[in-house]
Amino acid sequence: MHRGVLCPSCFCLSWSAFSVRALRTVSLFRSAVSSRVTVPSADAVGILQHVFGYPAFRGEQEAVIAEVLAGRDALVLMPTGGGKSLCYQIPAIALQRSGRGCSIVVSPLVALMHDQVGALREAGVAAAFLNSTLEQADADAVEQDLLAGRITLLYVAPERLTTPRFIHLLQRLHARGQLALFAIDEAHCVSQWGHDFRPEYRQLHILPQQFAGVPRLALTATADAITRQDIAERLQLQDARQFISSFDRPNIRYQIVEKRDPLAQLKRFIEDAHEDEAGIVYCQSRKRVEEVAQALVESGLHALPYHAGLPSSIRSEHQNRFLRDEGVVMVATIAFGMGIDKPDVRFVAHLDLPRNIESYYQETGRAGRDGAPADAWMAYGLQDVVNQRRMIDASPAEDDYKRVQTDKLDALLALAEATDCRRVRLLNYFGESAAPCQNCDNCLHPPEVWDATDVARKLLSTIYRVQQASTISFGAGHIMDVLRGKPTDKVQQFGHQAISTYGMGADMSEAQLRTVLRQLVATGALLVDAEKFNTLRLTEAARPILRGEQAVHLRQQAPSARRSRATRSSGVGGRVPVAAQSLDAASQARFAALKAWRSEVAHASNLPAFVIFHDSVLASIAAEAPETLAALRSISGVGDAKLERYGAEVLRVVACGATDERSL
């Protein structure tokens, strides 16, 4: 494994030194590149089976690969865990075998590069990366391997790709007809409307200009219609075929709860459903990340903090521990997560409201990449709505941008407040219809709905009358005190006990009133003025409610029900991993032995365990108990290279695992 870095400061060549020659090269080779012969699709199937060990393609994978092998551009939307990486890895291998040279993968994250390169090398594929973790000598060696044709896939960050030095390297390859494909991963980063905009992605528009005829494949897991259009325009893929897979992740259970004591609610959720399992907890601020991580550690959980304010060495250490150790809970800001390939994340929890549905979908999609059951849990309250609206209002962006972001936030608020199927709402946002899923909180435990119209009118009327009686505005706490008839010092100071609605909500609890206020803010009937200490103001949308022309129906907040703990193993000890819960006792013993063996191999290779074999592959091996290499090769996920490297050891572990786990 390479160590160290090629510093961006050494990429100091002037464009003028080679730009004219490069453009001449493009014109000379344009016709040769564009007339390439299509690689037979049978080659792709063979690579899938022999290199990666999978029997058949899933969903749109085969169609995408055929498009790329025909030399055409494509834009691919495929959910997390849907197999996006194979859409460019298999063409890259096929093109290399047919003499077309190296494929370049544009990736925004070092962690993703490391894991994917490690997994490809385990599968026997010549892969490498160029990023800031490489020392100069190692980076030079990668460049030499690239020019010598010894690399099938090279992963680079967009900042690296667009430097004059690297462009020059690619021009040399292109001049020899040895530049096969550009795969632009996490392509939503190019769009200002997306949830993770990165300005450096905008520079990728130079690819069709500098490397005419080289197919480009843009991939992302999340993009609504406006973001897809922006991606196509920014990357000059307007004429490319678009492949849009289903956004549905049926293995994920969506649950959104009202914030009461969020930290206690989070602890109870983890203890009830995911003790000793890997998960991610998202918080909005760095301070909150530190507090929550510490609280979880004090509760006996293996939790780590991650945010941009930590030293890079600490971030790297924590990320590696999350990827390599079992049962780690990562408490993080959104700085963590994109490109994380860990398949056995069993839950993603949000203690703060994300910015929009794209962010929510992308972040929750990091759970259950292996297809096994997983949870997306979120605690949501009035202050979340206030904070998100404040950030949009305070943004220096143009009004068009603010308007789009407000619409996106409104869609997320509608999802949070929904009383019908969460999955139906989520998929509808991406233009996909669906039937109720029977696997979200609203489907499993349909909420009771109550008519909050009268209470909403009283709250709005109180705000109006308080504003009329005073020259200053007031926040939610004071409004609720007036409506509930609490004679606080502030109420008496401003004489608000004389307002006609004073005491009309005495039978309502503060929690109930906050629920109504949250809904009114969420629907836009109320505006929280951040410049005036979070005071409340009526909007035009409040008029039909005050006039009795619009009803307000809200979900009845029921006490949180504790979920039963997951089944524990009686034969091996500890929680049974999801992948192994359907196995009998003997198979579970083999599974435990295989995991112990895999852990040793991964540690010795400095790789995450799932790069060696996923839990689902080990579970299949444990269930089938193969006795020969041929039988082992027939199991999905066991390719030729892994069979040759690990086959004999796996058979040995299987043979002894059920009877004597200690033989390892």
Image (cartoon, rainbow, N blue to C red):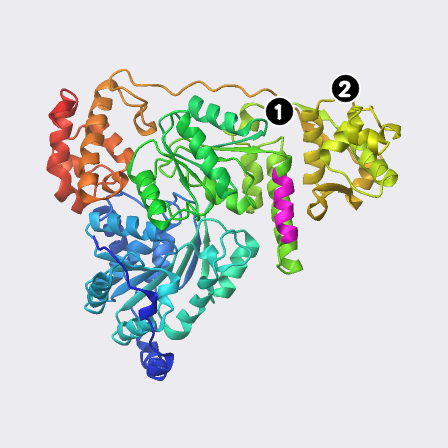
Question: Which residue is more in the foreground, 268 or 290?
Answer: 290
Tell me how many marks there are. 2
The residue under the point 64% across, 49% down is 406
Percent from the top left, x then y, of residue 413?
62, 40
Q: Nearer the viewer, mark 1 or mark 2?
A: 2
Question: Which residue is more in the foreground, 439 or 50?
Answer: 439
The residue under the point 65% across, 59% down is 400
Q: Is residue 238 left or right of residue 474?
A: left
Label 1: element kind:
loop
Most frequent secondary structure within the magenta stretch: helix
Q: Which residues are magenta?
A: 384-394
Percent from the top left, x then y, of residue 516?
71, 31
Hey, what amino acid is under mark 2? Asp
Q: In the figure, residue 276 lies in which quadrant? A: top left
Q: Counting other residues with Cα less than 10 Å from the Cα at mark 1, is it few (<14), some (14-19), or many (20 or more)?
A: some
Hey, what amino acid is under mark 1? Pro
Badges 1 and 2: C-beta atoms under 8 Å apart? no
Q: Which mark is residue 447?
A: 1
Q: Is residue 206 left or right of residue 168?
A: right
Q: Is residue 441 visible?
A: yes
Q: Is residue 123 visible?
A: no
Name the residue beneath numbered marker 2.
507
Outermost top residue? 570
Is residue 555 in the magenta section? no
Above or below, 147 relative to 556: below
Above or below, 15 relative to 621: below
Q: Is residue 12 left or right of residue 349?
A: left
Is residue 386 in the magenta section? yes
Q: Counting other residues with Cα less than 10 Å from the Cα at mark 2, is it few (<14), some (14-19), or many (20 or more)?
A: few
Question: Which residue is more in the foreground, 473 or 432?
Answer: 473
